[in-house]
Image (cartoon, rainbow, N blue to C red):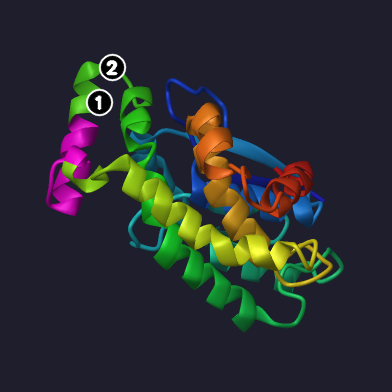
Amino acid sequence: MKPIQFYDLRLPALGEKSWSPNTYKTRYTLNIKRLSYETKWVTFQEVLTIIPEITKTGETPTVPIIVDVEKDKVIQESFKIAQYLEDTYPETPSLFHGNEELHASIQKKIGSTLALNLACIVVLKIIKAYGNEAEQAKFRKDRESKFGMPIEQLIGDPEDRIKAIQDGLEDFRETLTKTPYLTGSEVGWADVVLASQLRFIDSMDPELFDSRVLDDTNREKSLREWYVRMSVYA
């Protein structure tokens, strides 16, 4: 089987190191399914020029995308990629275990309770890693335009963000005291989504991640232990 081509997002200051929660979902997926792949790194700017030439759909260019060379297929967006690989390679370990709706509902919960709060505690580091000062300024301006406010206003009080993150993680900590993975005894898509969000913070600010996000002072160690289990697929 020819390796699948996986397009991941490169930040200049990080080099060829995964960090994006969206692309991390596909990296986890490919590793869990034990599928052969090669990583193609693209910058934010290259996403706008390279990806449309590959997808040829007219859709907004984003990553991740995969090119399944063996099947002559191009798939865009992490959930669609997971669905495609689940259907196309049924002999590989499953991500949905016959209950795609359950995993999708947990993904929705993570998106509504955690994603923005997590992004806000590292967004300034992303800007600094983006490139030179002029590139950073442009990236900041683009993001401020998208959210309709200065970055600092979006971030708000970082301690409020941390509290919201811990509140959002509480149910997952509780679940993981009872089962090794979020939906039972086997790793699945729900684990991929949460682990990708946490890897995002770990990649951008490991000290903050360990001390304030994974923080198990006066808490169950279940989340930390699960994160270690998930690291074999990262």
**Residue most extreme to the front:** 218
Q: What's the residue at 45%, 53% (across, down)?
A: 165
In the displayed structure, does residue 181 sit left or right of residue 14? right
Which quadrant of the view contains residue 121? top left
Tell me how far mark 2 sits from mark 1, CA to CA.
Answer: 6 Å
User: Which of 78 and 171 lies nearest the eye of the viewer?
Assistant: 171
Q: Residue at x 50, y 51 (%)?
A: 22
Whether residue 28 is visible, yes or no, is yes
The image position of residue 61, as x and y in percent, is: 37, 52
Q: Pointer 1: what residue?
A: 136
Does residue 198 lie above or below 177 as drawn? above
Q: Say which element carries label 2.
A: loop
Q: Amino acid at mark 2?
A: Asn
Proximity of marks 2 and 1: CB atoms separated by less than 8 Å: yes
Q: Tell me the residue that label 2 is attached to.
A: 132
Q: Is residue 148 left or right of residue 120?
A: left
Comparing 39 with 58, the one in front is 39
Element at label 1: helix
Position of 195 relative to 173 (above/below): above
**Residue occupying the point 62% across, 47% down:** 218
User: Please, is residue 58 above or below residue 50 in the view?
Assistant: below
Q: Quadrant of residue 45?
A: top left
Q: Which residues are magenta?
A: 138-152
| 140 in the magenta segment | yes
Instruction: Determine the main secondary structure of the stretch shown in magenta.
Output: helix
